[in-house]
Image (cartoon, helix red, strand yellow):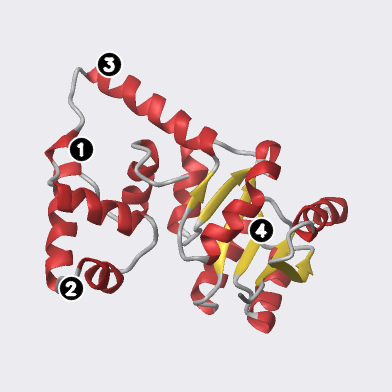
Amino acid sequence: MPQIRVLIADDHGILRKGIRSVLAQDGDIAVVAEAGDGSEAVRLAEEHSPDVALLDIAMPGLNGLDAAAQIVRKCRRTGVIVLSMYSDEEYLVRAVSAGVRGYLLKDEAEPDLVRAIRMVAEGRTFFSPSISNRLYDDYAIRLQKQESHDSYELLTDREKHVLQLLAEGKTNKDVAALLSVGVSTVETHRLNLMKKLDLHNTAELVIYAVRKKVLRV
């Protein structure tokens, strides 16, 4: 099995060294490049075409989220994970909108780092468990205050399956192949589930899936 090739981008050399040290313990992961800012991260991603780019969210010159958006656009095979100090939903929405596949909180990243890299390299998504728990709790409280019901149970079993696959980063074509149905059928399921859940774009769909703990961690 080929090694997972990783780019590390952080403006603090000591943190890059620490991440490299953690990853060096896994023989299936190879660090192919290191960057000290967002612009350099984009350049090195284009040069090395890594499987995974691990980006600090706060970097000089070009921040991690903007760098992530450029890498996703320019390097189609590279999955992006951001390391962040921020657990609030605003940053998570911005990250998902940029095309990020993984979101790890810095203060709890070490035990999940290798697993996150493996999952993103496989085309899946990964969010720090505490983020999922917090969003779930906030969502439950909001429903209780509004005395409203969760629309998730309005979905059919097939729509729930499609929701999970889309939230994991699969395209309509990927989902169609996995479910042995036509792309138009998947598009119909997608439209129906987003209407039932009052979602308007892919970022909202992913955040909803994180809230509901639909994504497997």
Sequence-wise, which precedes: disc 1 or disc 2? 1
Q: Which mark is residue 152?
A: 1
Sequence-wise, which precedes: disc 3 or disc 2? 3
Q: Which residue matches tag 2? A: 183
For the residues labelled 1 and 4, the Cα–Cα distance comes to 33 Å
Q: Amino acid at mark 1?
A: Tyr
Q: Quadrant of residue 85?
A: top right
Q: Which mark is residue 145?
A: 3
Query: Is residue 45 visible in the rendered structure shown here?
Result: yes
Mark 1: secondary structure: helix
Q: Position of residue 192 (x, y in %)?
A: 12, 53
Mark 2: secondary structure: helix
161 or 72, which lies in front? 161
Q: Position of residue 96 (x, y in %)?
A: 45, 54
In this rendering, the answer to whether 48 lies above or below 132 is: below
Query: Is residue 194 visible in the rendered structure shown here?
Result: no
Q: Amino acid at mark 4?
A: Leu
Image quarter of the N terminus? bottom right
Q: Amino acid at mark 3?
A: Lys
